[in-house]
Amino acid sequence: MSQPQTSLSRNITVTGLVATGISSMIGASIYIVPFMLQKNVPGIGPYILPAFLVAAFPALFAALTYAILSSAMPRAGGSYVYASRSLHPYWGFVASFSQWFGLSIVIGVVSYMVVPFFRDVCVTLHWDGLALFFGESTTRLCISLGLLWIFILINIFGIKTYQFTIITLVIITFVLASLVIIAGFIYTEQDFIHGVILKESIVIHRLPGEFNWNNFMSASAILFASFIGFDSIAQAGGEAKNPSKSLPKAIIITIVSVSLFYLLFTYSVYKIVPWNFVRDLAGFKDLSATTLLDYILPPFWSVLIMLGACIALLKDLPSMILSVSRLVFAWSKDKLFPQWLTNVHPKYHTPHWAILFSGIVSTIGILGSHFASDIFLGIDIMVISMLINFILICISLLFIGKNNPALAQKISVIKNKNLQKLIAIIGVLTLSCLLYINVKNDLEIYRVVWYYHATYVWLAVMGLGTLLFIWYWGQLKKSGLNKNYFKELPSE
């Protein structure tokens, strides 16, 4: 009887990798977060753009760290492989386990959030019957589950199907989102003020803001979540063409292009809309770029922009599914998870069991969002998990030369060791600052029960990951584990 295939095929191009990173990073949040932040962080005022720049700073150093390590360790489950080969398998597994759990739950949350966006498009178009249909609780649950499993099947059906889907969705997202940027060049603040007078009979003026460091850093910590996702490129390291070059290139292209897009998009809206009007409106209703620009844009433009938010959210799913499934695949390759999860589909050359397993966990995220009515807990867990994961990857870069000099020699991006250490240290310091702010804010908010605090849930997940690691580590030792087993890369 032939053995199951456990090797992935290297078919993802640089374009596919960049689309994967962009897809994971640019979601519907760009349409909402920079504006609702006026409510969530009272007093941030006109300093949203500088806060975005500060948030991008640690993300850039984390991305550089990923780019450096990906050139030496181009394998599926990138972040797990980097930490396990540079530090210890425990840190690689536990950190990536919390990352996998957080992302898997967020995949469910994203699936659940898509349906109201389509409902709002129908409301704007006055398709009242369809809007009522999308507004039904049962309909929302069924469509969410359907969308999730459609994208799971797309991931299973091979890299060509995945690449075509992800590149198409990214292009549509950029085209529709560019309408907001174009509006920023066409319209002025006076046009907006005139539009508000016509629709609301309200006269508004832009006011000066008062800078506050605490508000500013809290806003930056929230905005940092927008930059999470470029690591999905590293997770696809086992399927990238010419990976030692294509992975670092894709990571750098993604983080730079997404950062510029965020800044230009946000600037375009705040150039037209006075920040104090955003603050006042956010105090009593949910805001988005569409809500604000509706005062001046033709109705058809507003519908297209709203549809762009729908597609931006929808396209998160295929890349995140790829990311979490490759982590499961990498653990199984290293015998730290059930071996059957390493099986690769004989026709499509994808880790179908790992994809299905992660899909089941994401389904729990949908059910949790539906029955618990809390979509933000999963996002908060993901942010804390990713921050800790990024910190460990920066620490991995610091110690790879000492702990694994053979792999350190294979680094082909930014080869200067002093510069590598500088990048890693800045990454650790800036990311730790953001982690402190996130945890502090989470623990200071009153919750009815402990498991509504993302920090406590993350600790519980880390505890579960530790127990799993101890069990599998014990099995490995009993099997006569070679001491150099985790010094070498997993097989292709």
Image (cartoon, rainbow, N blue to C red):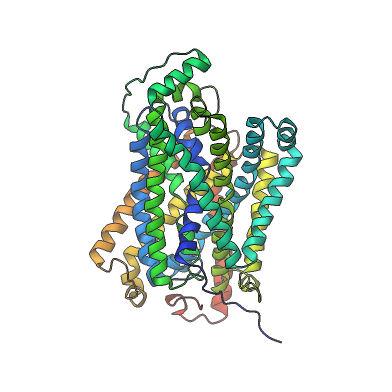
Q: Going by the image, does 12 lie left or right of 435?
A: right
Is residue 437 something one can see in this rendering?
A: no
Foreground residue among 180 and 487? 180
Give residue 93's position: percent from left, percent from top: 51, 64
Q: Going by the image, does 51 lie left or right of 225?
A: left
Foreground residue among 150 and 237? 150
Give residue 209's position: percent from left, percent from top: 33, 24
Q: Quadrant of the N terminus?
A: bottom right
Q: What residue is at 42 percent from the left and 23 percent from the top? A: 191
Give residue 58's position: percent from left, percent from top: 35, 49
Question: Taking 461 as reference, is 411 above or below it?
Answer: below
Q: What residue is at 66 percent from the left and 36 percent from the top? A: 119
Q: What residue is at 32 percent from the left and 50 percent from the top? A: 429
Is residue 349 something one can see in this rendering?
A: yes
The quadrant in which residue 194 appears is: top left
Give residue 378's position: percent from left, percent from top: 57, 45
Name of the residue lying farthest toward the bottom: 1
Question: Taking 170 as reference, is 400 above or below it?
Answer: below
Question: Taking 423 as reference, is 474 above or below it?
Answer: below
Foreground residue among 8 and 389? 8
